[in-house]
Image: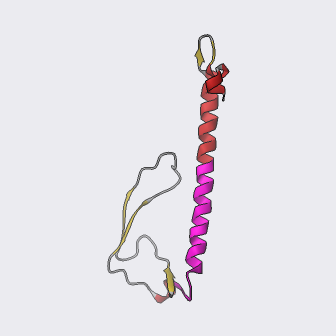
Amino acid sequence: MTARVFLLTPDHEGISIGRRVPTLGYDGVTISSLSLQRSPVPSGSCLGPFEDDEPLRKARSWEDEILTAAGLGLMRRALDCASEYARAHKSGGKPIIAYQEIGF
């Protein structure tokens, strides 16, 4: 299998970028549909050809690492916000974090 990779700018002929998909907590990540219709690719925009799919596997690996880091950051922010709320919100005259089921 020969893999081909190419780079095009958003204003390239025949490229249509769809509406942004709403994401929960991932405000810094833009996800949308992409359509290529009769988009000639200049030879200067091509990378490769590659004899195997190693460049694609590396790109997927980088993507996995970026999404993992984003997920960890999102979880950390959620934990910080929940902890802050549990310390500030009171029920029964004491912060709710003092209750065993919340503190855990």
Question: Is 78 placed left or right of 45 in the picture?
Answer: right
Which portion, as a residue range, is magenta? Answer: 46-72
**Residue 58 spot, x, y in % from top left:** 61, 73
Question: Is 30 placed left or right of 63 in the picture?
Answer: left
Q: Is residue 98 above or below residue 76?
A: above
Please report the residue visible at 58 percent of the width from the left and 74 percent of the height from the top: 57
Looking at this view, name the residue that lies furthest to the top. Answer: 93
**Residue 81 spot, x, y in % from top left:** 60, 34
Q: Nearer the viewer, residue 87 or 29?
A: 87
Please report the residue visible at 58 percent of the width from the left and 51 percent of the height from the top: 71
Q: Is residue 56 above or below residue 24?
A: below
**Residue 54 spot, x, y in % from top left:** 59, 80
Most common SS among magenta residues: helix
Please report the residue visible at 46 percent of the width from the left and 73 percent of the height from the top: 9
Q: Is residue 74 above or below residue 68?
A: above
Quadrant assignment for the C terminus: top right
Q: Is residue 66 magenta?
A: yes
Q: Is residue 12 above or below residue 98?
A: below
**Residue 86 spot, x, y in % from top left:** 62, 25
